[in-house]
Image (cartoon, rainbow, N blue to C red):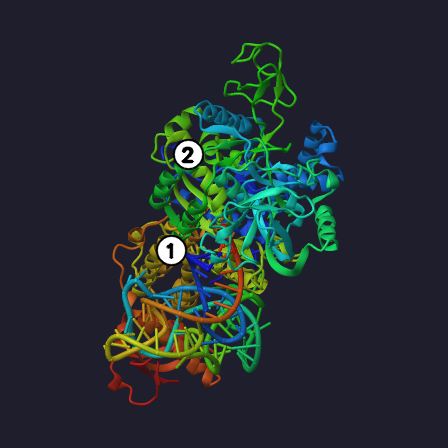
Amino acid sequence: MSDFVPKLTEKTYDPQKQDLMLFKKWQEEKIFAFNKSSGKPIFSIDTPPPYANAPWHMGGAIHYSQIDMIARYKRMAGYEILFPMCLDRNGLPIEVQAEKKFKISMHDVPREDFLNMCRQLLDEVGDQILDICKILGFSNNSLEWDEIYKTDEEQYRTLTQSTFIKLFKEGQIYEDDRPNNYCTRCKTTIADNEIDYKSGSHTLYDIRFKVKETGEDLIISTSRPELIPAIGVVIFNPKDERYQYLGGKTVITPLFEDEVPIMAHHYAQMEYGTGIMMVCAYGDSSDVQIFRELKLNPKTIIDTSGKITDKVPEYAGLKVKEAKKEIADKLEAEGYVVDKADAPHNFPICSRCKTLVEFLAMPEYYLKQVEYLPKLHEYAQEMEFFPPFMRQVWVDWLNTVSIDWPISRRRYYGTEVPVWYCKSCNHPNLPEPGNYYQPWKNDPPFESCQKCDSSDGFIGDLRTFDTWMDSSLSEIYTIMHPHNKKDETLFNELIQRPYICDVRPSAKDIVRTWLHYTMLRGLQLYNKPAFNCAWISGFVVDSKGEKLSKSAGSTIKPENMIEKYGGDAVRFYGAAEASHGSDIRFNQQRLQGISKFINKFYNIAKFLSRFPIITNKSEISLQPADEWILSELARVVEEAKSGYEIFDFQIPAKSLRNFTWETFASHYVELVKGRAYNRNNSYEEREQKAAWYTLHKVMKELTIVFAPIIPFVTDLIYRGIYDKTVHLEKYPEGKEIIDKQQYLEITPTLLDLNSAIWKYKKSKQLPLNTPIEQVYMPEILFPLAKDLASMHAIETLVKEKDEMPEGDIISINETENIVIRI
RNA sequence: GGGGCAGUGGUCUAGCCUGGUUAUGACAACUCCCUUACACGGAGUAGGUCAGCGGUUCAACUCCGCUCUGCCCCA
């Protein structure tokens, strides 16, 4: 026995000690690098570029772990994996953060200086995120700084600008001066999906107006008295009997004494206040809509910094809030306020900085999307969604889209709008696609105006794009820039496929933005769906079910959890904890439980690593117990595969763990220990070697099928015992493990029997290795008789019940009994 | 107001599509055991009638309807 020296020597698995060493090996050996000439079919993953403004919380770590499992499974299934790492570095959040950190306002420092401040923050956080990627063992093509892509680098922004130029020339983009959501703090127009809602309450004033024609009073409820000078129309519901006679008449506003028409419009709710509603330029999005429908001229009284304009001289320069108070006070003082009460209200706020959104008309560029909705609905039905119910999230959004996409922003840290305006005729001049343009600081690459031929010079556009203009091209960038180097040949080859990229992994909250816009642009640019399938995950929330970002604190930072329990444990936890698409309530205790399994797995491997590896099958004679466990293995390998195929990692995680810990470790290993060691020399060499063969066969395949979920411990084991990396192995087929699955029907009885004997000995307060004189057991277990006798130290196994009249009769389950005599 | 998802022992979770023996597993708890891979281990015990109500059915956790609760999205 002492001849058997384990190849794995560490007493326990210590992730802190092993993981980084393994990760370094993967890097040196470049085993995950993309190799387009491998001859394998390419599988492309549109990695979501993590936004580099804040380090990951557990949600990010777990989300990306699962995306890595997609890559690892597909790699083992025979695909060449295009799986970039990347960082998203454009947009508002980083600007807001830079302003806070450096205590400046973006508009008060030179643009170039501000950009550098943003970059400094982005670099710091970017490094922190990449560090977590490493300790979680991600298999991106590369995690080297130069080989990961960043959305703010020149070649990425060149791509964004090139698509703008192309679509502009095709007439898909137009400029319009329509009212839109405007954040007065960020000083930019924002799109509908950049709006959040905050619940709170506001004061509802019942204010007395006068009808010009009849002289009667008209009471109107409003929460925004400061907009009285901006009223465009006063409406009542067409079904409202009370006010029919007012149609076509005129109302005179209090204080300002403007004359405003009264009309019927379905938007007025009869039950709300008095049923009369004032429509202003602009109180909310419905005002915008009504103005548009009724073709009224808006009188905009709020400027871009959220102050009252000189169109209302008495209050010019006041902030909206201040004006509201002053006007409300004056209305009250002069007796115009009939009643006032607080009412609950959902306020639209900027999703980035939480400032109240106003509605202002600004000239902005728009990308057409409304006319593409029917085709996008088709795509939504055709594209595969994992899990399927997530399809509805996009369909719901498609049903609410009603206006084209405003794509320009009055911000700095983003891709510049590549347009110069002619000083003479103001015509927008666009450069040729293919280069990166910065109109705010550079001269245009042309001398004279394309329209009027004037060479008086140009004014560069100061705006940038909505960051989704960049993000919605990520799948194109992915297939065009492996290792962040442009490869047109590869792109031309891949773009022939019926979709642009294989899979879009995403969290459910950005379906309406990232997935939606990417699908739109795929349609516009290449007339095909951007993806073959979309993989959508839920969130990681805290133990109360609330979002992590708010309440997490510092205790459950992913780096702390990984340090404590290991990257594999965090990955496994994320895979096993919830079915695909559901939220995970983070629970550290359960994570700790997982780390115990990882160690158990290592120890099983360490145990059997002491036995020689048998490769020549002619040396062995497989015993029924061997055929049984190989059959069980083949079954669980197929079951795991069914989960991997739909990227639902809970299925392999749970089934493989159960097989490993229960079936394999507790039953098979115990069953064949005696044979593997050949205790008492009671076995033939061929039988002993069969045990060795089977132990290794199970371990080897198990390591392979577990590798996508727990890449560190599996590779440690595989390299330690089988001298190569597990990560380039092929995912096994059940048939390759055993030709014909056998003995599967004995599994429940076998487990029941073992349990019964353990329980029996325990009830007699005997150690488990106490010899048993005689046992009679169910017939279907006879084939395993010899191994069972060895496992339980049984001296005689009786096959005929009659031959053993004396002994305790124990029922092991509903139908079967055993007789036992110590 | 509309839509989506969910409500299973202390905690988390499987099963529900394709109704049918004592409802899966894990974590935690409790008891016993350091048996030569592992105490980050092993054996065992206790704990749920599947949110509520009604319906379909010989039979419902599983199908249908309503109600309640939670989360998310939209208005």
Quarter of the image where one finds residue A608: bottom left
Q: Is residue A639 above or below residue B28?
A: above
Image location of residue A650, percent across then percent down: 44, 57
Compare residues A234 and A467 and report the one nearer the observer: A234
Secondary structure found at label 2:
helix
Q: Amino acid at mark 2?
A: Gly
Say whether residue B29 is left or right of residue A44.
right
Q: CA distance from mark 1 to mark 2?
A: 34 Å
Residue at (39, 54) in percent of width and height: A389
Image location of residue A269, percent across then percent down: 51, 55
Q: Is residue A6 visible?
A: no
Q: Give the residue at mark 1.
A: A640
Q: Give the residue at mark 2.
A: A522
Image location of residue A597, percent across then percent down: 51, 61
Quadrant for the C terminus of chain A in the image: bottom left
Compare residues A190 and A735 and report the one nearer the observer: A190
